[in-house]
Every structure is written in structure tokens, then in C-alpha cells.
Amino acid sequence: MSDKFIFQNARIKSMESRLLGQQQLQRLTEAASVRDFQKILAESGFGASASGDNVSADRLIEAEEKAAAALLREFNVDGALDAFLLVYDYHNLKALLKATVTGAKSPVLGAEGLFDVEKLKEGAEGDYTSLRPLMAEAVRSVEKSVAEGRVTPHGIDCTVDKAMFRDIVAVAQKGGQAVAGYFVFKADCANLAAFFRCRKQGLSEKLFRENFVDGGSLDEEFFLSSFEMPTEVFRDKCKFTPYRVLAEKACDEGLIAFEVAADNALLAYWKKDRDDMFSCAPVVGFYLGKLADIKAVKLVFAGIKNRVEPALIKERMRDIYGA
């Protein structure tokens, strides 16, 4: 037991009321227009760091995303939360590599993690000195693909994602057993999603291998040994793993139901320990709760803008962390 997160957890407890609750989310879903949606969103305090009057929903969402990452950086005691922050860095590296390859001038970047974006940009352009070893390895792999004339956006995604999971699973050890276990769980969910997506779309075993990431508890052979068999066989195989319910969701209800259930399970991993003041669980749970709020807001906003049937939005809605 450690008390190094006591101060941070106490602050988090005072901030939990800022998360969206079911009542606020319901108000957002009932908004009659984009303008009404933006008004309700601003009134809830979502994206409060965005400046100006009549701020757009897009800017409120962007402000909330940056605030979530900033909070994680501020509360990152002894590097215990580095793995979560590295996710931002690898996503930005991915965008910068694609821009370098295509010549795009303004890549869409997310919030900063552990790295300044300029350092990542230098790395994407060939200066590896400031990058982590696995980041540099990913850049060199992309450069090789470019030289051989076989680079694709999907290939860049796969290369960087593989490096990211290898890196964050190793770094997660600094956060203790809970953080390490979470990222093992996350890697397994990513591989399950890739397996079911490839099977549903009739894609090749080769493509699945390209998408497979290391770091999970289910190795590549666990999937490949069942790849040519009916998905029901794989579902039965998963009965003896922690992923029985997720496999059943994918086989019986489809990919959307699987993705919703997987996201809910990843959030529940931390939600059960939200009152453990002697671990990083309250901080991580609050942070992931913020991400869940952002995802819900984006989903509802897209539905209102595009006049999507409410039933379709409800089908894709994940659990939230707030009351």
C-alpha cells in the first residue's frame, strides 16, 4: 500500500461532480438543434477552458480533450501514468508520419503526452535522437516502406500501433499491477476487435497478423488456430478466458455490440476501485471518465448534425463514469 496518490486522489474526489451524469447526457440527446446542443454543453461546464462567447461544440470538445491530458500530466506521480500519456504521443507520431509521407501541411494532432509535438515532428522527419527506442524503430520501418514503394496509411497505422503497445505495456509496469493489467486487457481487446472485424469482412489471415499487437494475454496463435473455423468455435474457445462475454457479444450481436461492451469493460476495470485512495485508481478512473464523456458527446453531436435516428445513437452509447 502506498500513499503517494493521496493528495491527487483527494483533489479528484472534489472534481468528480464535473463529469457528465445521466441527466445531463439525456438533455444533450434531446437537443433540438446544434445550437441548443452547444448551449446545453457549455452550461454543463464541458470544455470550460475554451475562451470566447458562443463557442462551437467542436472547440468545446477540443478543449476538454486537452484538459484531460493536462490533468493526467499534472497528476502523474513518479511516472506511474506514463503509459496513458504515451498513447497521445504515438497517435501524434502516426499523424506526423502520414503528413511527412504525403506532404500534408497541417496534420490533425491530439493533445501532447510526454513529448513536445516539435520533438515528435523532428523524429517523424528522421531525427530519432529525442524519440523512445520503439518510436525510432517505427519511424525507420515506415522509412523502409517508403523506400520500397509499399507504404500505405494503413501500414503506418499498423507499424505505429505495434510499437505503441509494446512500449506502453512495458512502461505500464511503473504504475503497478493495476495499470499493467489494464493495458494487457486493452491489448487483448484490440486483438479481439481485429479478429472479429477480419472474419466479418472476409479479410485474410495475413491482414489480421499485420494488425495483431503484442502485450496481451492471448498470443497470436490463439487467434490463428481458429481463423479458418466458424466464429462459434472461437467463441467456445474464449469460454476459458476473461473474454467469454465479449466473444459472445461479437458472435451473437455483432461488432458494434462488441465494441460497446469492450469499452464498458475497460472503464469498469477502474470504476470498481474509484474510492481506493491508496492507489492511482481514482485518478485513472476520473481521467477515463472524462474520455468516456468526450466520446459520448461526440457521438450525440454527430447524431444531431447528421439527423441520425436516436435508436442508432443509443445502440452505440457507452457507459459513463459520472453518477
Image: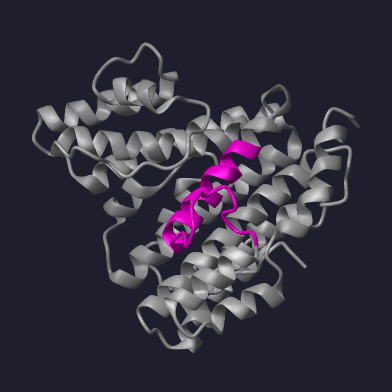
Left or right of 76? Residue 160 is left
Is residue 190 depicted above or below 301 in this figure? Answer: above
The residue lying toward the viewer, choosing from 222 and 248, is 248
Q: Is residue 192 visible?
A: yes
Left or right of 291? Residue 4 is right
x%, y% of residue 59? 44, 55
Which quarter of the picture shows residue 158?
A: top left
Image: magenta residue range: 45-71
Residue at 63% across / 66% down in the picture?
43
Is residue 194 depicted above or below 305 in this figure? Answer: above
Residue at 31% across / 26% down in the picture?
121
The residue lying toward the viewer, choosing from 92 and 272, is 92
x%, y% of residue 225? 43, 56
| 53 within the magenta span | yes
Q: Is residue 241 visible?
A: no
x%, y% of residue 247? 55, 69
Is residue 274 depicted above or below 9 in this figure? Answer: below
| 46 within the magenta span | yes
Residue at 52% across / 82% down in the picture?
31
The residue lying toward the viewer, choosing from 201 and 284, is 284
Residue at 26% across / 48% down in the picture?
154
